[in-house]
């Protein structure tokens, strides 16, 4: 199945995302300092996508911890 083209967001980024993006720049720059992939993170849109992935990963980790805790109680 072909990928659909990327669409421009219809609403601005939430405040927490805007405040976090400069910190994310530093994290990405440190993590990929000597790699060519770093050039792909230059745009604000790319940073927001990466931030969303990190937030989703954190959410999944928290959710799995809750599920594990609940399964231990059963």
Image (cartoon, rainbow, N blue to C red):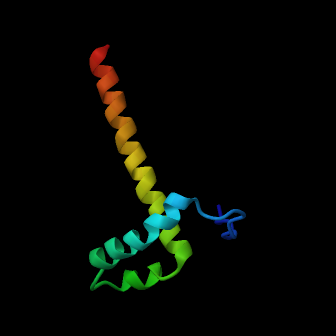
Query: Residue at point 35% right, 31% down?
Result: 66
Q: Where is residue 51 in the image (x, y as percent from the top left)?
A: 45, 63
- Image quarter (top left, top right, bottom left or bottom right) of the N terminus: bottom right
Indicate the quadrant where residue 10 lies: bottom right
Indicate the quadrant where residue 71 lies: top left
Question: Which residue in the rendered view is the most extreme toward the top?
Answer: 74
| Residue placed most toward the observer, 43 or 34 | 43
Query: Residue at point 30% right, 26% down?
Result: 69
- Image quarter (top left, top right, bottom left or bottom right) of the C terminus: top left
Q: In this view, does 69 lie to the left or right of 46?
A: left
Indicate the quadrant where residue 22 lies: bottom left
Q: Position of residue 61 (x, y in %)?
A: 35, 43
Q: Position of residue 6 (x, y in %)?
A: 66, 70
Query: Residue at point 38% right, 70% down?
Result: 23
Q: Where is residue 44 in the image (x, y as percent from the top left)?
A: 53, 76
**Number of labelled discs?**
0
Query: Residue at point 69% right, 68% down?
Result: 7
| Residue placed most toward the observer, 9 or 17 | 17
Q: Is residue 27 left or right of residue 5?
A: left
């Amino acid at each position: 199945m072909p990928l659909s083209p990327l669409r421009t967001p219809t609403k601005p980024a939430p405040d927490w995302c805007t405040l976090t993006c400069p910190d994310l720049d530093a994290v990405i720059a440190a993590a990929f300092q000597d790699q060519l992939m770093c050039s792909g993170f230059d745009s604000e849109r790319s940073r927001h996508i990466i931030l969303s992935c990190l937030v989703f990963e954190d959410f999944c980790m928290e959710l799995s911890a809750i599920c594990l805790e609940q399964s231990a109680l059963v």
